[in-house]
């Protein structure tokens, strides 16, 4: 493994890197810029059928009858399935979600029937020909209401709408701390549904061979776990001991949306099974909006207190989460929320409980940050309130409470590298906190902690890599990682290229196919750079050692005198042997050897114990966002003037891609803060299109400044930590805090729409003055 | 290989088809099974701007026995001829010939008898891709002025008629019905062949072969077809022969021998009748004599238009002629059809 | 999606007669950006689409030298209007509106006639044109007729047009000197928006004073059709244009609006925004008058 | 470029297409419909790799105009298996080692299927006849013939 | 097929038979195999299907295929030079991090191309305006806007010169 000497030497040799730390273009960018990259949209198999799903017309109803006669009679229709026709395939974390509903629907999104036809238009028509008779049931849409005894039950067999989930912890003594605290705040915050809006809609193709081995082409972030899910579906179909192969085409964005397997994937499998033909299900945009899972909405109650020096004494939070009609991984977001709740800033006494509640709404799922944005919105808003109550400058207050290297938090998270103080510093300096400002302009900041060294959600947090080299010194890396646009292929290529002394162009990273690529638990928790990076680095080191040994034998020079760089071995600065030549020699020789190595890396992190204690990540990422806003007090509209995002990333392996993650995360966060919401009216998605779901446009783009704080983490590959999710975590509270700073109103419910701001202003001071001079300058603000 | 572009018509009846032929003239080809024509089109040997499909002309797809004999529509599939019991029973030579075309079963479900009779002549220097042909001068058949198949060159085309069904049908005195928009004519099948390599059929551009009439079997008659090829299927004949023998009381009263695949048209051997008439049927010595005659006659025509050596093919004419005549005579005497004869 | 035939008439009369011969089963299409979406979603299911793109009329954009009136062909795209210096300099209120309709891709294709005929309550194209007292020339089997744009709309998706009629031209009369106009679409994002509210204000000042000679205050999404707020307009005429008078006009306009709650916004907020934006657009009108005079 | 309408049923699916007159059935299957089971081995009707069944009879799809297949039922090798059950011929080819490189296999299967449909009790000679229009370079035909015979035998047993 | 249309596709005369109800995106993707343009929403709200018709960026999902008869269509597949040299914009998107998942990229690049053809020296506001109809969920647009800005030479009035220059370097 990595020897300590080399690790310790890292900081010193940093300048000598040839590819690490360079702004290298994404390895897949040219294909994407020329239209060559193939997405699920672009794939077609011979004889392929097109599947389509019929969804419920009611949020909650008995299914009396599903009439499929007309659909079946339509020429071109090959298979029609209803809940009565199929074995009980069940999805989700609790397996409470039947693939096709029989007897009862529990949300508008419920799948009632599915068809496969020779043409997408025929499939569409067939769906319209299915007659379903429903008997409407009373429905429940508010999670707090759903907890009341008289509420209709979403799953009768559970006797309650409250999920039996153990989300409750108490470290230290919060009640005692409350007595000690000098300043206290207590507030309710809420967030609503937002959705991923991946530009490439969801889709899958399922294909059985004649021995019933299954290949699924799908957009997934979890190929190995998807393989397992599909295997289970096969088992229920009575198909045992068959291979399941998952092939990922180019993925048009993930953001957590592909962290589970979904009805459309399993439906494609069933349709393919019954039709005995490949079946593709591809969502249209409207379907993408209504039938994929959004971010979990939350209601949060938070109390926090500090002593008179401003040191946090306790944090007491409880949440109600709208689980929707079924339980997916979204219901486990409290496990991640625990991280900021217990460990964002030093806070000795923490109490937290969360209730996940069934409703007849759509069910939620993982989305970038996995609960962290919701929790951080409440925490960081309340920090500002507490600082104000204590009469301490907001920046100072955060400095006082900042996490520091070497801390062990109440939950048992071991903080190793920690650049939070530097992040706070960078933001406060850049935005010049404390200086007087013009009317309606304010600044705000908020910080984050996130897992940066994997996250042990499952028993394993591992990732495998296989590396082989060819006659020409070219390197093939087979990784368990999943690149869905974030650039993991490029990062892995850089890590391997650096270690093997070759160029990034020499390295081809292959991640698309479970038949070829090693096992991995998926692209989640910002773990890929850290875990897959370390895995690749370990494999590259094995190759490197063998290359050195061989080269030493070939040249007669001692291994420690050989330097591997620029595709060759150097002795005292002079090239003596090209790698390619060495490799050819090793192949074209009697009893030659092949250059190949594998490595499985499982980070030294821990599963959470019974009381949720445990160091879930090998290291943690920190960051602080600062924002300057201008509020149009007549309209309530918020304009972002400046934005700075400072992140402790360990090491920036590729600053170009790192910037991309931050800029993208920030704009997604701004949307979360200001414009985005799935508008649900009694369980029905009212804005299932880009026109009314306000994903921000280029006109709204913010030129955010990404500040990189490098803390060179001991465990990270070349010192790097994860950065995929953090960009969108503290955005909403930073903006909410800036709005408060600008106009003295605090919005506690996301998104912060102009209506909410204006209503709050009106509530605050009754009337609004609309200076005729002020608004003439900045008409753009309103647009 | 792609087909060049053309327009496609599928007339609903013969009248319409003949109308189309009349209006399109020489730019048009009749498409029956397509097994020969489409290959030629792919090779760029012919480039009709119009194809008139016989697919919908059910009137041309009928085979039936009449008082006068056998009436075969030009678009009757080879497989249908083979499956027609009377052919098996009474015209074993025809059965043998049709079976020998291409490969049994597959091509037979597409190929038609009319198509087989009306196929263009073949030559190893002509029936090739454009790419192949581009390496040489253009030959007579392709519109140039030389012949590679004839030693020392020639101002005539020396391609061969490769229809397997023509020799036996001519030997049986079959007639063909030729139709155009304004005219119908019936003539002996041999008159369909011009013996001009460049344009081996006597059909006018607006004419179409519609029917083949085979005389009714007479008591004491026998037919046989022989084909020599390297492979048992999907091969063209090096030499083929169709023989018809009429006997009366064990003696030959009338006989015809037609050699295929050697000349620009099916080659009828004139001396046969004179030599064999009134001899006992199956008289080996006489047959040998005739076979030599046939070889000598054929020798004047056989050109280097196939890959096999001219000398070998010439010699084989006698062998194949002899076998055909012998088997025809046996059948004449035994009065057995194809199936019983096996 | 329903299948249809796409007919390409070469003249206006041919288009009209094609429509007549496919009575009830045909609709006209120009840029097609709305029609296509409606067909895809099943809201429209015509057997025939009659393209107006090749009829040879309706693409003119210019000022009639004699009358000084601005003529905009029904088939002029929003992009043409957006990039026209004539529009930008002399009719900035129109420019305000068209540059924010859909995206560049949509504006490159979608036509002003289509925007009017669509008759959505938010029709961005219509609000400034109504403020400018535009009239619409309509052609059909009965010949040509002209209606004031303000009377053109009858309800969501409904206009005064008879079946088979085509908008050939929009005519904006010459505006008096010292006229300034401004339009604002108010939405949640900076682009790709259907507005929460759209406000157009056009003010003509008396010579040598700040007194209002003529006022137009037009609103989109404030009622089932684009509307003029007559009480607010009447209030302003004869008064000095000041923060206070504009303020009052804004209040009157807000009162007169018939806004309602929808997914895109709440009524109370829309009413507030009418008030705010009438003021702001009023100020902008003054600014533009000043700028013009400074030239 | 003057496409003409083509109504055709392929493996039970009805297609309403428009094709150019010079499109062969093979091109239609492979290029337009992505049914790549039928192979082009020679393009001139010699090798049999492109064989498909037209109304139950084997034809060379490379020498059949797509338009000539109008109104017919085409079966390709992709349509042989029914409901995931391999056709007995396919099963037999697999069991008898009749498949080597596999390029001729689909054509061979279709010829054999055509034979089985038209003559369920064919003997060795008929089988040879039936596949005589196919060239196979790997197997020497023996195992192919055995594979077909085995299926025919089975149906004889049933009888 | 109900009719035949002729148009210039990525510089090549093209003649195809189409149905009246096809849209341009369907024609390109399903019939001509050009899958570079993507369908992100099918109703002109995301811009992933953007192509250039006679110099104008349009949503191909809302463009009647019939109407490209006689016109010139440029798709992402036709942007790079015949020898494979990337267009300056493509290079710039690649090297400036303008690409993450890549789904919006073809449309984004073509919208930018149409802008630069019309206005060789756009301001940041012009760029934002031109790209407003192209949604991107990964990048936050920052690096996309930078990618476009990078090929705009503020000193030169001739974008083609700039494009050539950038095209030659590297």
Image (cartoon, rainbow, N blue to C red):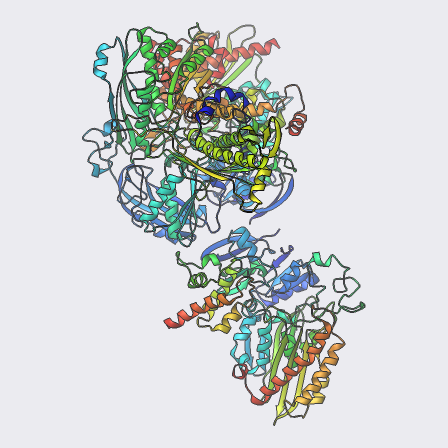
Residue closest to the far bottom: B249
Residue A535 against residue A726 in the figure, above or below: below
- Depicted A738 relative to depicted A676: above or below: above
Would you say E122 lies left or right of A110 here? right
Percent coordinates x, y for residue A607 in the rendering? 31, 30
Residue A99 or A465: which is nearer the viewer?
Answer: A465
Where in the figure is residue B286, as x and y percent of width and height? 69, 89
Residue A668 appears in the rendering: yes
Q: Residue furthest left?
A: A149
The answer, for residue C144, to whether it is visible in the render is no
* Frontmost residue, E136 versus E68: E136
| Residue B172 screen position, x and y as percent | 63, 81
Q: Could you tell whether B86 is left or right of A601 in the image?
A: right
Q: How many marks?
A: 0
The quadrant where residue A433 appears: top left
Question: Where is D9 relative to A125, above or below?
Answer: below
Which quadrant of the rendered structure holds the N terminus of chain A?
top left
Quadrant of the image occupied by residue A685: top left
Horizontal side, residue B121 vs residue C222: left or right = right
Q: A18 or D104, which lies in front? A: A18
Q: Nearer the viewer, residue A147 or A711?
A: A711
Q: Position of residue D2 (x, y in %)?
A: 61, 52
């Amino acid at each position: 493994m990595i020897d300590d000497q080399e690790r310790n030497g890292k900081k010193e040799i940093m300048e000598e890197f040839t590819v690490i730390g360079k702004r290298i273009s994404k390895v897949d960018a040219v294909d994407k810029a020329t239209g060559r990259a193939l997405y699920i949209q672009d794939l077609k198999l011979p004889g392929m059928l097109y599947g389509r799903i019929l969804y419920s017309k009611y949020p909650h109803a008995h299914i009396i009858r599903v009439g499929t006669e007309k659909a079946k009679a339509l020429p071109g229709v090959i298979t029609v399935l209803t809940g009565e026709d199929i074995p009980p395939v069940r999805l989700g974390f609790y397996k409470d979600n039947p693939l096709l509903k029989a007897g009862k629907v529990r949300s508008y999104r419920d799948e009632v029937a599915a068809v496969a036809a020779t043409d997408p238009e025929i499939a569409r028509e067939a769906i319209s020909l299915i007659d379903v008779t429903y008997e409407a049931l009373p429905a429940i849409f508010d999670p707090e209401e759903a907890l009341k005894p008289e509420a209709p039950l979403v799953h009768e067999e559970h006797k309650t709408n409250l999920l039996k989930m153990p989300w409750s912890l108490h470290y230290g003594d919060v009640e005692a701390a409350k007595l000690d605290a000098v300043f206290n705040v207590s507030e309710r915050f809420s967030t609503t549904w937002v959705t991923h809006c991946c530009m490439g809609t969801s889709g899958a193709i399922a294909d059985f061979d004649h021995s019933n081995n299954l290949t699924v082409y799908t957009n997934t972030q979890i190929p190995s776990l998807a393989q397992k899910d599909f295997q289970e579906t096969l088992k229920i179909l009575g198909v045992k001991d068959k291979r399941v192969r998952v092939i990922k085409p180019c993925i048009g964005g993930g953001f957590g949306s592909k962290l589970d397997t979904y009805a459309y994937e399993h439906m494609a499998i069933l349709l393919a099974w019954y039709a005995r033909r490949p079946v593709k299900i591809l969502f249209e945009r409207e379907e993408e909006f209504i039938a994929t899972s959004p971010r979990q909405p939350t209601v949060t109650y938070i109390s926090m207190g500090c002593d008179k020096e401003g040191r946090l004494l306790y944090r007491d939070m409880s949440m109600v989460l709208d689980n929707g009609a079924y339980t997916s991984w979204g219901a486990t977001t409290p496990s991640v929320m625990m991280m900021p709740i217990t460990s964002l800033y030093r806070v000795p006494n923490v109490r937290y409980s969360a209730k996940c509640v069934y409703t007849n709404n759509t069910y939620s799922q993982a989305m970038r940050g996995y609960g962290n944005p919701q929790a951080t919105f409440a925490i960081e808003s309340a920090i500002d309130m507490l600082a104000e109550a204590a009469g301490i400058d907001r920046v100072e207050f955060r400095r006082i409470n900042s996490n520091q290297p070497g801390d062990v938090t109440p939950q048992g998270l071991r903080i190793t590298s920690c650049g939070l103080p530097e992040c706070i510093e960078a933001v406060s300096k850049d935005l010049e906190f404390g200086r007087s400002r013009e009317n309606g302009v304010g600044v705000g900041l908020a910080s984050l902690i996130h897992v940066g060294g994997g996250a042990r959600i499952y028993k394993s947090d591992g990732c495998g890599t296989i590396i082989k080299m060819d006659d020409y010194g070219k390197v093939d890396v087979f990784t368990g990682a999943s690149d869905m646009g974030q650039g993991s292929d490029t990062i892995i290529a850089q890590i391997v290229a650096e270690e093997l002394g070759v160029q990034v162009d020499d390295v081809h990273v292959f991640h698309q196919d479970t038949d070829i690529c090693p096992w991995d638990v998926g692209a989640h928790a910002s773990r890929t750079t850290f875990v897959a990076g370390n895995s690749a680095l370990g494999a590259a080191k094995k190759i490197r050692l063998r290359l050195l040994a061989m080269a030493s034998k070939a040249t007669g020079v001692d291994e420690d005198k050989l330097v591997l760089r620029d595709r060759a071995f150097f002795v005292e600065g002079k090239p003596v042997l090209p790698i390619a030549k060495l490799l050819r020699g090793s192949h074209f020789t009697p009893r030659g050897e092949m250059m190949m190595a594998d490595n499985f890396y499982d980070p030294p992190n821990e599963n959470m114990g019974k009381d949720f204690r445990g160091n879930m990540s090998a290291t943690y990422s920190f960051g602080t966002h600062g924002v300057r806003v201008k509020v149009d007090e007549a309209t309530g509209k918020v304009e972002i003037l400046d934005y700075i995002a400072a992140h402790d990333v360990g090491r920036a392996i590729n600053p170009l891609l790192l910037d991309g993650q931050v800029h993208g995360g920030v704009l997604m966060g701004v949307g979360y803060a200001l414009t985005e919401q799935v508008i649900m009216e009694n369980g029905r998605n009212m804005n299932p299109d880009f026109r009314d779901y306000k994903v921000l446009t280029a006109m709204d783009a913010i030129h955010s400044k990404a500040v990189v704080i490098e803390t060179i983490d001991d465990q990270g590959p070349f010192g790097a930590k994860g950065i995929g999710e953090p960009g969108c975590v503290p955005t909403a509270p930073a903006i909410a805090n800036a709005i408060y700073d600008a106009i003295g109103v605090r919005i506690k419910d996301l998104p912060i729409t102009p209506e909410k701001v204006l209503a709050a202003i009106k509530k605050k001071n009754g009337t609004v003055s609309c200076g005729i001079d002020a608004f003439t300058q900045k008409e753009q603000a309103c647009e | 290989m792609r087909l060049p572009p053309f327009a496609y018509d599928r007339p609903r009846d013969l009248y319409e088809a003949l109308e189309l032929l009349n209006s399109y003239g020489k730019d048009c080809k009749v498409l029956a099974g397509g097994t020969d024509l489409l290959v030629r089109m792919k090779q760029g040997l012919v480039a009709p701007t119009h194809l008139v499909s016989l697919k919908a002309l059910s009137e041309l797809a009928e085979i039936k026995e009449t008082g006068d004999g056998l009436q075969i529509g030009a678009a009757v599939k080879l497989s249908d001829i083979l499956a027609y019991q009377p052919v098996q029973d009474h015209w074993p030579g025809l059965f043998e010939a049709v079976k020998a075309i291409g490969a049994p079963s597959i091509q037979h479900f597409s190929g038609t008898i009319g198509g087989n009779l009306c196929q263009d002549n073949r030559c190893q220097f002509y029936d090739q891709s454009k790419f192949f042909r581009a390496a040489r001068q253009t030959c007579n058949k392709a519109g140039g002025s030389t012949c590679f198949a004839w030693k020392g060159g020639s101002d005539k085309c020396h391609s061969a008629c490769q229809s397997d069904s023509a020799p036996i049908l001519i030997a049986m005195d079959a007639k063909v019905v030729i139709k155009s928009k304004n005219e119908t004519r019936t003539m002996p099948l041999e008159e369909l062949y011009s013996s001009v390599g460049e344009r081996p059929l006597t059909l006018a551009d607006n004419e179409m072969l519609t029917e083949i009439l085979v005389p009714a079997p007479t008591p004491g008659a026998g037919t046989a077809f022989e084909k020599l090829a390297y492979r048992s299927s999907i091969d063209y004949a090096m030499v083929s022969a169709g023989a018809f023998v009429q006997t009366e009381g064990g003696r030959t009263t009338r006989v015809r021998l037609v050699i295929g695949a050697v000349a620009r048209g099916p080659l009828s051997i004139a001396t046969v009748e004179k030599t064999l008439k009134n001899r006992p049927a199956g008289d080996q010595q006489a047959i040998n004599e005739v076979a030599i005659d046939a070889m000598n006659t054929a020798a004047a025509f056989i050109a280097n238009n196939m890959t096999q050596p001219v000398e070998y093919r010439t010699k084989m004419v006698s062998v194949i002629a002899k076998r055909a005549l012998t088997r025809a005579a046996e059948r004449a005497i035994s009065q057995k059809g194809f199936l019983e004869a096996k | 999606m329903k299948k249809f035939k796409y007919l390409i008439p070469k003249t206006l009369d041919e288009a009209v007669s094609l429509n007549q011969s496919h009575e009830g089963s045909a609709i006209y299409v120009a840029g097609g950006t709305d029609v296509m979406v409606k067909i895809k979603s099943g809201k429209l299911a015509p057997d025939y689409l009659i393209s107006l793109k090749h009829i040879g009329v309706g693409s003119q954009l210019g000022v009639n030298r004699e009358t000084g009136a601005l003529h905009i062909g029904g088939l002029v795209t929003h992009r043409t209007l957006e990039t026209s210096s004539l529009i930008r300099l002399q009719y900035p209120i129109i420019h305000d509106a068209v540059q924010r309709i859909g995206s560049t891709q949509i504006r490159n294709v979608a036509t002003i006639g289509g925007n009017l005929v669509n008759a959505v309550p938010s029709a961005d194209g219509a609000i400034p044109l109504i403020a400018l007292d535009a009239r619409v020339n309509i052609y059909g089997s009965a010949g040509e007729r002209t209606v004031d744009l303000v009377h053109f709309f009858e309800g969501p998706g409904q206009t005064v047009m008879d079946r088979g009629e085509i908008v050939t031209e929009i005519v904006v009369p010459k505006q008096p000197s010292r006229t300034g106009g401004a339009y604002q679409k108010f939405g949640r994002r900076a682009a790709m928006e259907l507005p929460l509210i759209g406000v157009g204000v056009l003010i003509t000042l008396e010579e040598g004073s700040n007194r209002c000679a003529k006022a137009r205050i037009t609103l989109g999404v404030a009622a089932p059709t684009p509307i003029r707020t007559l009480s607010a307009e009447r209030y302003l005429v004869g008064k000095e244009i000041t923060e206070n008078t504009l303020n009052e006009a804004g209040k009157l306009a807000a009162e007169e609006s018939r806004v309602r709650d929808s997914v895109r916004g709440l009524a109370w907020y829309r009413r507030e925004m009418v008030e705010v934006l009438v003021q702001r657009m009023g100020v902008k009108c003054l600014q533009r008058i000043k700028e013009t005079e400074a030239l | 470029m003057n496409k003409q309408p083509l109504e055709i049923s392929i493996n039970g699916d009805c297609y309403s297409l428009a094709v150019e007159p010079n499109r062969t059935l093979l091109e239609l299957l492979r290029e337009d419909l992505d049914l790549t089971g039928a192979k082009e081995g020679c393009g001139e009707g010699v090798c049999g790799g492109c064989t498909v069944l037209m109304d139950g009879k084997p034809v060379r799809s490379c020498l059949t105009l797509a338009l000539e297949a109008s109104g017919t039922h085409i079966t390709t090798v992709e349509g042989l298996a029914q409901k995931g059950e391999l056709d007995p011929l396919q099963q037999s080819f697999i069991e008898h080692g009749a498949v080597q490189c596999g390029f001729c296999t689909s054509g061979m299967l279709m010829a054999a299927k055509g034979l089985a449909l038209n003559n369920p009790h064919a003997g060795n000679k008929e089988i040879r006849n039936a596949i005589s229009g196919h060239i196979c370079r790997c197997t020497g035909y023996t195992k192919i013939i055995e594979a077909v015979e085995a299926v025919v035998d089975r149906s004889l047993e049933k009888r | 097929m109900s009719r035949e249309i002729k148009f210039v596709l990525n510089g090549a005369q093209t003649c195809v038979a189409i149905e009246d109800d096809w849209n341009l995106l369907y024609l390109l993707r399903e019939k001509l195999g050009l899958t570079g343009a993507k369908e992100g929403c099918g109703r002109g709200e995301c811009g992933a299907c953007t192509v250039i018709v006679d110099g104008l960026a349009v949503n191909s999902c809302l463009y009647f295929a019939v109407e490209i008869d006689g016109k010139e269509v440029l798709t992402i597949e036709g942007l790079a030079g015949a020898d494979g040299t990337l267009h300056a914009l493509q290079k710039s998107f690649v090297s400036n991090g303008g690409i993450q998942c890549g789904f919006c990229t073809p449309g984004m690049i073509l919208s930018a191309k149409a802008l630069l053809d019309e206005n060789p020296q756009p301001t940041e506001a012009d760029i934002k305006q031109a790209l407003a109809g192209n949604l991107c969920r990964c990048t936050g647009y920052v690096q996309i806007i930078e990618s476009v800005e990078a090929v705009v030479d503020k000193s030169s009035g001739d974008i083609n010169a700039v494009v050539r220059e950038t095209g030659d370097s590297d």
